[in-house]
Image: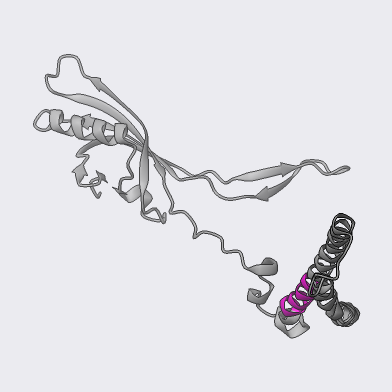
Amino acid sequence: MTTPMVDDLQLTAVQWLRQETQQGFAEHRVAGLDGAVHQKVGRRSHRVVVSGLLLPETAADDLATLQDKASSGAEVTFTADIVTALEVDKMVVESFAAEQVPGSAGQYAYTIVLAESPPLPPPAEVSPFGGLDDLGGLGDVGFGDLAGALGDIGDAAGAVTGALDAAMDAAKAVQGLAALAGGLGDLTSLSDPLKPITDKLGELRSLPDTLGRLPGLIDGLGG
């Protein structure tokens, strides 16, 4: 039998080991069905319970080591025959208890509970439009061009918005010109009083072309 170890600490006088594995299931009731449907949502962490003695020769140092590992909460490596078939890399000390045995100077009894601590999965990556370009096989059914089509519509919509903003600016310019005319009474001294308006109206010339392209872009999504 291989001597159980927590990191580099040998547990030479183990009296009892217990390994537990529990599946994780979500229970769903179905009308008219006796019993329930169980959906697997992921296995719970493997747990190992170890009970033994710390022998007098190294009991004080071994006890201090186990207490330090339990209080720190840091991950540890556990090796023993009982976990040979399990893919367990790291564990954490879930609980630790120690007792001094009366009449046996320098000898301690202990129970330590270790729980599997698996590595976290890689962070999720989100790409534009839900990552359609990255899903295997969807390019064959035309989803690969969806982002480009939506991008064209977005550009056209932005152009329309800019043209409408220009129209609002032109209206404000007309109002400002009217107020100026009312205050001065004579606009003949102005070199080009209508220039602000003509500039804004020039920005609106692209609006019909932009609006004309929108139906074709939208029809392209349906195709």
Residue 121, relative to residue 103: is it above or below?
below
Q: Which of 167 and 81 is in front in this view?
A: 167
Image coords of residue 75 (percent x, y)? 33, 45
Q: Please check the rendered image and state whether residue 154 is part of the magenta-colored stretch, yes or no.
A: yes
Q: Let me know if residue 170 appears in the view.
A: yes
Give the magenta part as a residue range: 146-159
Q: Is residue 185 left or right of residue 22?
A: right
Residue 185, relative to residue 91: is it above or below?
below
The residue positioned farthest toward the top in the image shown: 102
Q: Let me know if residue 221 appears in the view.
A: no
Residue 4, relative to residue 178: is it above or below?
above
- Most frequent secondary structure within the magenta stretch: helix
Image coords of residue 13 (percent x, y)? 21, 36
Q: In which quarter of the image is residue 48?
A: top left
Q: Please check the rendered image and state whether residue 94 is part of the magenta-colored stretch, yes or no.
A: no
**Residue placed at 20% from the left, 30% from the top?**
63
Q: Which of 171 and 62 is in front in this view?
A: 171
Image coords of residue 171 (percent x, y)? 87, 63
**Residue placed at 27% from the left, 36% from the top?**
69
The residue positioned farthest toward the left in the image shown: 57
**Residue placed at 86% from the left, 67% from the top?**
187
Q: In which quarter of the image is residue 26?
A: top right
Residue 83, relative to residue 96: is it above or below?
below
Q: Nearer the viewer, residue 15 or 197?
A: 197
